[in-house]
Image (cartoon, coloured by chain):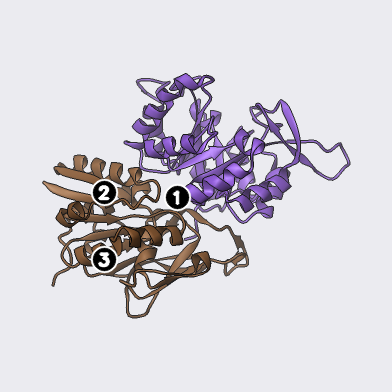
């Protein structure tokens, strides 16, 4: 049996994530115990940890710090596979421009930047912000989480801020929307995605299944 | 390689049943929103919109159960609209598994509700539904007003101003329905859609009037829609989602294959 902890720091809808993981578990014949929790002991005991997030970064970081999730994510990622999703990914970076500037966890190097208003595509087209809908992810490196997922598959995104990873980071996937940004990042036991695998139909479910099967980075 | 324009089938539900039913080949239950949502998802729908038209609030528990059942089987975004009046209504639907809620009349009665909702739950899950009707006379510059109660009650509010105001309050997306075109199969009100889409930074979903696939293309190319919503052309089996995507792709529109 695998224990999956979806970290709940009170910021919105985590049901989509847990429902998708449960569905994938049933499909793959895995016995899972999925909990949506802020309990540090449960999170420490989990075999897989999911670090989601929606909403404004200042509120998210406030709750993450208040509940001690910042130290916990750093701790569990040393020996447990962690999947960070959307604002969960953004929270891993050093700093976000949102809400007039917010210090984040600094577990990965780089910044979170605003797409811009207006955001203009290279051909002059004005792009809507938030970046909402299905866009292609170009895989930049081989990773167990990409297994069975065709390169340039479309995943579902909804965000107004994007990751600008430092050159030292391993960007696992890039997406183009006005500019190229990090749609996925690999950092040891952490795999972080800007898109929502739980809302990305077959390719998203496949990524979640790959995550459940992933034993983490080789030391 | 660009962001795909979205195709969104809409299910109108009354007491947990899809109104009028949906004609799919060998579907077991033409009125079951869970089965229909699953079929649309498999057929390549980019999102599902579930519009609750249940009149009495006592029967809304059924809606919550239905939303929860859909969310357990359908892993594309799910928007729930109809009767969303309080922050508690939003919480209930998000907890049931909705990804977004669509607010309509409650926003007209109290615009601050949209601001509170966006602050509490994030703009990404707040869709504001706008029902607009043309009020300018022949020869005058185009002008549209917001209508409530299924297009019967005028509010005197200019539709373009209203869209701007709702986005300033934190709406993350606009679901725009032309009450002149709704149910006519004559195509979207393209001038209305373009006026609003060009006025706001957030995505606009065009709705009301789709009768054929060319209408979907026009909605994107002339109406500047980011997504197109349709009910009857899909429900009654005239066209499949794949027919629509193929047609749009042939006309140069980026879609998710």
Mark 1 chain: B
Please tell me how crowded label 1 is: few (under 14), some (14-19), or many (20+) other residues with Cα within 10 Å: many
Shown in purple, the chain is B
Colour that chain A carries in the picture: brown
Picture layout, residue A127 above or below residue A201 = below
Q: Which residue is mark 2?
A: A37
Q: Residues within 10 Å of mark 3 (few under 14, many from 20)?
A: few
Whether callout 1 and callout 3 share a subunit is answered no
Q: Earlier in the sequence, mark 2 or mark 3?
A: 2
Q: Secondary structure at mark 2?
A: strand
Residue marked by disc 1: B256
- Seen as rendered, the residue at the extreme left is A1
Q: Are discs 2 and 3 located on one and the same chain?
A: yes
Callout 3: chain: A
Which residue occupies the foreground of this view, A121 or A49? A49
In the image, residue B171 lies at what x, y percent?
A: 57, 48
Q: Residue B43, image x and y in percent?
A: 40, 38
Viewer-side label of 1, 2:
2
Callout 2 crowding tier (Cα within 10 Å): few <14, some 14–19, many ≥20: some
Q: Provide the chain ID for the residue under circle 2.
A: A
Q: For this view, does A91 lie left or right of residue A24?
A: right
Distance CA(mark 1)–CA(mark 2): 34 Å
Q: Residue at x 34, y 72 (%)?
A: A106
Query: Which corner quadrant of the image does residue B42 belong to?
Result: top left
What is the C-alpha distance between the residues marked 2 and 3?
16 Å
| Residue B210 at least partly seen | no
Residue receiving disc 3: A71
């Amino acid at each position: 049996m695998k224990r999956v902890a979806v970290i709940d720091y009170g910021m919105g809808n985590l049901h989509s994530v847990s429902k998708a993981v449960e569905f994938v578990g049933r499909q793959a014949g895995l016995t899972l115990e999925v909990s949506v929790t802020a309990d540090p002991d449960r999170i420490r005991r989990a075999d897989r940890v999911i670090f989601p997030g929606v909403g404004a970064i200042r509120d998210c970081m406030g709750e993450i710090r208040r509940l001690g999730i910042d130290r916990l994510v750093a701790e569990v990622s040393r020996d447990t596979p962690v999947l960070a999703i959307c604002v969960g990914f953004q929270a891993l970076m050093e700093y976000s421009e949102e809400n007039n500037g917010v210090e984040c966890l600094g577990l990965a190097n780089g910044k979170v930047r605003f797409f811009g208003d207006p955001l203009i595509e290279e051909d002059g087209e004005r792009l809507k912000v938030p970046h909402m809908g299905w866009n292609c992810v170009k895989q930049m490196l081989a990773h167990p989480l990409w297994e069975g997922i065709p390169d340039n598959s479309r995943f579902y995104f909804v965000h107004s801020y994007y990751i600008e990873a430092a050159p030292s980071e391993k960007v696992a996937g890039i997406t183009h929307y006005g500019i190229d940004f990090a749609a996925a990042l690999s950092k040891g036991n952490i795999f972080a995605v800007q898109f929502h695998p739980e809302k990305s139909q077959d390719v998203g479910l496949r990524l979640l299944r790959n995550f459940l099967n992933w034993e983490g980075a080789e030391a | 390689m660009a962001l795909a324009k979205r195709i969104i089938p809409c299910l109108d539900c009354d007491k947990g049943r899809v109104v009028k039913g949906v004609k799919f080949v060998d579907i077991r239950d033409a009125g079951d929103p869970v089965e229909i949502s699953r079929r649309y998802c498999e057929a390549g729908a980019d999102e599902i919109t579930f519009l609750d038209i249940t009149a009495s609030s006592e029967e809304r528990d059924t809606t919550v159960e239905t939303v929860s059942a859909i969310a357990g089987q359908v892993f594309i975004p799910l928007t729930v609209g109809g009767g969303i009046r309080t922050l508690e209504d939003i919480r209930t639907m998000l907890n049931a598994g909705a990804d977004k809620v669509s607010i309509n009349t409650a926003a007209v009665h109290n615009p601050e509700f949209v601001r509170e909702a966006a602050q509490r739950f994030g703009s990404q899950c707040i869709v504001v539904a706008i029902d607009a009707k043309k009020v300018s006379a022949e020869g005058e510059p185009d002008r549209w007003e917001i209508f409530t109660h299924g297009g019967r009650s005028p509010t005197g509010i200019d539709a373009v101003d209203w869209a701007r105001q709702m986005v300033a309050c934190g709406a993350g997306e606009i679901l725009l329905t032309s009450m002149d075109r709704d149910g006519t199969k004559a195509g979207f009100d393209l001038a209305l859609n373009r006026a609003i889409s060009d006025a706001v930074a957030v995505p606009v979903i065009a709705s009301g009037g789709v009768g054929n696939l060319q209408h979907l293309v026009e909605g994107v190319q002339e109406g500047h829609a980011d997504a197109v919503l349709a009910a009857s052309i899909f429900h009654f089996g005239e066209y499949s989602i794949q027919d629509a995507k193929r047609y749009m792709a042939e006309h140069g529109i980026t879609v998710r294959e």
